[in-house]
Image (cartoon, rainbow, N blue to C red):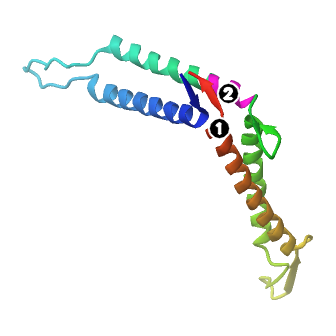
Amino acid sequence: MKVCHAEVMKLIKELERQKATLLDEERDGCRVSYKEGEEPMAGEYDYAGTRKAVRALDERIRTLRATLAKANCTVTVEPFTVTLGEALVMLAQLRSECEVLEMLAGFRQRSRRITMNGVLEYTDCLFDVRQAAEDAAAIRKKIAELQVAIDRANLNNFVEI
């Protein structure tokens, strides 16, 4: 069956949710408590069945992730002319750079304070704070464009699952 990358990601998320639910049910139902002199109630927990179900979910998730990873190495994200895998790395790098630039843009070009002994102290930034703000805005714009390009590639490219 051919599906787009976005559908594969949603399927993986659903399988991971199913696994989490199964593990929660296991944690809650794998033991039984009873008082001295009482017979323990028979539980419905099936150790072997639960392990088999978890392994099956893990295998399906692994297969889908591998399929997606292979596709991410070949699908090109336009207009950036990088693969999806590279685009995801680029997105993380741009977000990190934007965070730094936004921090730098938050400084005042020159600030002053009075020290504990009453001396007036100045602090000058060794860069143009306005330029950092403009660069951060440009990177935010590029991040938005890249995210749209990634989303478009994930919707327009299909894999066999």
Q: Locate residue 125 relative to residue 158 in the image: left or right.
A: right
Instruction: Compare residues 26 and 158 and report the one nearer the observer.
Output: 158
Q: Does 78 appear above or below 20?
A: below
Q: Which callout, 2 or 1, points to the residue nearer the camera?
A: 1
Instruction: Compare residues 6 and 140 and report the one nearer the observer.
Output: 6
Q: Residue furthest top?
A: 48
Residue 39's disc number? none
Do callouts 2 and 1 mark residues in contact (Cβ within 8 Å)? no
Give the image quarter of residue 64: top right
Q: Which residue position holds label 1?
A: 156
Looking at the rendered structure, the kind of residue marked 1 is Asn
Give the image quarter of residue 143: bottom right
Q: Which residue position holds label 2?
A: 69
Q: Is 69 one of the magenta-colored residues?
A: yes
Q: Position of residue 106 (x, y in %)?
A: 75, 72
Q: Residue at x 82, y 69 (%)?
A: 134
Q: Does 111 appear above or below 53?
A: below
Q: Residue furthest right?
A: 126
Q: Locate residue 11 relative to residue 77 in the image: left or right.
A: left
Q: Is 87 one of the magenta-colored residues?
A: no
Magenta stretch prevailing secondary structure = helix
Image: magenta residue range: 67-73
Instruction: Compare residues 116 and 137 and report the one nearer the observer.
Output: 137
Q: Quadrant of the C terminus?
A: top right
The numbered mark, 2 or 1, whose residue comes first in the sequence reads 2
Q: Residue at x 70, y 24 (%)?
A: 70
Looking at the rendered structure, the kind of residue marked 2 is Ala
How far is disc 2 from disc 1 in space, using C-alphas?
16 Å
Q: Position of residue 154 (x, y in %)?
A: 64, 38
Q: Residues within 10 Å of mark 2 (few under 14, many from 20)?
A: few
